[in-house]
Image (cartoon, helix red, strand yellow):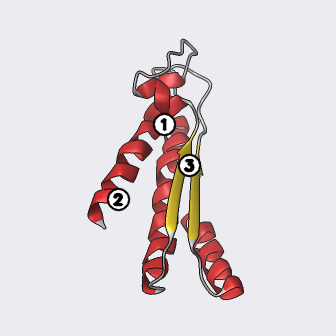
Amino acid sequence: MSRRVETLAKLAFDTYGGVHLLFNNAGVGADTTVWESSLADWQWVLGVNLWGVIHGVHYFVPRMLEQDTEGHIVNTASIGGLQELGLVRSDIPGELLFNWIAALDGTSDMWLLER
């Protein structure tokens, strides 16, 4: 996935001369319980829901900052992130594995403090 995001960033900057809005979206889940989830399930879910966002930030944000213009990052996730925070309840098997996207919420808050 890293190469794909890197290629996308290069294409966006080359085509449009800059990027001012970055949208990271995550929200996949394995349809199984945590104890029945394979390591491949965990790798896929975390690869999309967490690492996908990390790759987006890694390849876009440094170049966005070099532009020295206003820019925005929008990180979105499905309702599963709210379930992990206890704001929405779900009894669907596999939701715990899916809800690791809650890490995205904390990561987004951390970025606000860094700048």
Label 3 environment density (alpha carbons within 10 Å; few <14, some 14–19, many ≥20)? some
Compute the Cα span from label 3 to label 2. 19 Å
Label 2 environment density (alpha carbons within 10 Å; few <14, some 14–19, many ≥20)? few
In the picture, which quadrant includes the C terminus? bottom left
* Sequence order check, earlier mark of 1 and 2: 1
- Mark 3 sits on what residue? 48
Q: Is residue 40 above or below residue 98?
A: below
Do we see residue 81 in this rendering?
yes
Q: Secondary structure at mark 1?
A: helix
**Residue at the spot 59% in from the left edge and 68% down from the top edge:** 5
Looking at the picture, how far across and down is residue 47, in whole percent? 52, 49
Tell me the amino acid under the disc marked 1: Leu
**Residue at the spot 59% in from the left edge and 40% down from the top edge:** 27
- Mark 1 sits on what residue? 39
Q: In the displayed image of the protein, which residue is found farthest to the top?
A: 91
Q: Is residue 46 above or below residue 19?
A: above
Taking depth in this image into account, of 8 and 41 the one nearest to the observer is 8
